[in-house]
Image: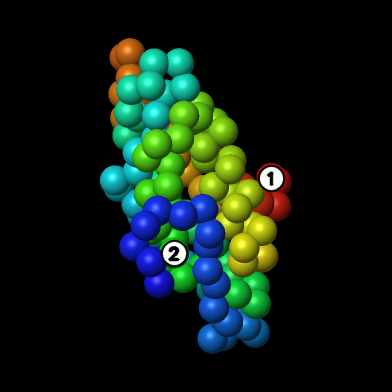
Amino acid sequence: MSTEPTHALEVFANPRPGRNYEISFECPEFTCLCPRTGQPDFATIRIAYTPGEHCVELKSLKLYLWSYRDTGAFHEEVTNRILDDLVAACHPVRIRVVGDFLVRGGIHTVITATFPDR
């Protein structure tokens, strides 16, 4: 597997497909770019999901999240795009993605996106 950032997410077979259990990730070094200023935005991305037939492979998740370092997008778009890409890759029973962005201009932003929709 490469160590270059990529938008590709790899999956593997869920070792316990008959059991509902939750997998949680915390990614405290997420960076993307503000689409207005080009300055970096820093966040902690939290992902919690109940896998269906597949689980997301961690190294591919790391490289996927790294791919946003040079991407300009609003916080709302980034968080929802991560959710959409994870749903498309591993088809979870349910998933929650939280983008907890550091203060910018005196405002702390937290975006929560879920599947299925609440």
Asked whether 56 or 10 is in front, the reply is 10
Residue 97: x %, y % from top left: 51, 48
The CA distance from mark 2 to mark 1 is 28 Å
Whether residue 62 is visible, yes or no, is yes
Is 48 placed above or below 100 here? below
Local packing at callout 1 (Cα closer than 10 Å; few below 14, some 14-19, many 20+) is few
Q: Quadrant of residue 92?
A: bottom right
Residue sitting at x 32%, y 34%: 42
Q: Secondary structure at mark 1?
A: loop
Is 43 placed above or below 10 here? above
Q: Residue 60 — which label?
A: 2
Residue 75: x %, y % from top left: 48, 30
The reply, left or right, for residue 6 in relation to residue 69 is right
Residue 14: x %, y % from top left: 57, 81
Residue 23: x %, y % from top left: 47, 67
Residue type of the residue flagged with mark 2: Ser
Residue sitting at x 58%, y 49%: 83
| Badge nearest the viewer, 2 or 1 | 2
Asked whether 99 or 70 is in front, the reply is 70
Is 105 placed above or below 15 here? above
Q: Quadrant of residue 13?
A: bottom right
- Residue that extends furthest to the top in the rendered view of this protein: 105
The reply, left or right, for residue 72 in relation to residue 107 is right
Q: State the residue position of label 1.
A: 118
